Image: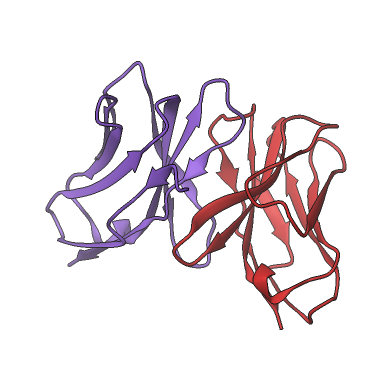
Amino acid sequence: NAGVTQTPKFQVLKTGQSMTLQCAQDMNHNSMYWYRQDPGMGLRLIYYSASEGTTDKGEVPNGYNVSRLNKREFSLRLESAAPSQTSVYFCASSEWNADTQYFGPGTRLTVL
Amino acid sequence: DQQVKQNSPSLSVQEGRISILNCDYTNSMFDYFLWYKKYPAEGPTFLISISSIKDKNEDGRFTVFLNKSAKHLSLHIVPSQPGDSAVYFCAASEETGNQFYFGTGTSLTVIP
């Protein structure tokens, strides 16, 4: 099993550009999450999807949108990237909401 | 405000000795706690969990202790090995909640 996969691994954007981060899981999990990790800040929840067809805001949703495409896939979109969105982004999944989460390898995003 | 705190950014321990990583929380409704381990350029990996009905959970060299009255949990690693060198995050959630709150992490270095 691949677990949770994320693409791309690295990305450099200019301010104002848009991009979509892709995440897929093969564990038949119901819930999926997007986090960002910044130095000294730990992991902060951006958006989550408790089950297919639902999405909800987390702690830091501003500037992001998400789509739960199907049970396997959960994408994160930056419509107009800003330097403050420079971070490492992690996708995670769990069998049920607030259950033990399993993380992907991360996407390192730099916005110039 | 940070609901889960790891006040020690770093810790160094000699190989073979005990490592003790600490975590404090402010929300008395938290009743499920996780520890994750993270190597550089990888996603966090689940290590061990504990629910509030227990005060101790053990898995091999790893033991987590929970003191609900003090709102404190700790992770003990005995004996510590160089491969344990990583960043450790604690996370907490409410039983009826919908997200985990993560601490800022403690970087453990085990010296051979």
Looking at the rendered image, the quarter that the N terminus of chain A falls into is: top right
**Which chain is the one coloured purple?**
B
In front: B95, or B78? B95
Residue plotted at (74% across, 67% down)? A8
Task: Describe residue B5's horizontal placement relative to residue A56 as left or right.
Answer: left
Residue that lies at the very extreme toward the top in this rendered image: B53
Q: Residue A109 placed where, x, y %?
A: 68, 71
Q: Is residue A6 above or below residue B29?
A: below
Residue plotted at (26% across, 48% down)? B21
| Chain A on-screen colour | red
Q: Residue A48 placed where, x, y %?
A: 70, 40
Q: Residue B33 placed where, x, y %?
A: 41, 32
Q: Quadrant of residue A55?
A: top right
Residue plotted at (26% across, 40% down)? B74
Q: In which quarter of the image is residue A14?
A: bottom right
Looking at the rendered image, the quarter that the C terminus of chain A falls into is: bottom right
Task: Describe residue A7's horizontal placement relative to residue A99 as left or right.
Answer: right
Indicate how the structure is coloured in the image.
Answer: by chain
Residue A2 visible: no
Q: Residue A94 placed where, x, y %?
A: 62, 34
**How many dots with numbers?**
0
Residue plotted at (41% across, 43% down)? B4
Residue B96 visible: yes
Task: Describe residue A73's horizontal placement relative to residue B67 as left or right.
Answer: right
Task: Describe residue B16's horizontal placement relative to residue A78 as left or right.
Answer: left
Q: In this view, does A37 lie above or below B54?
A: below
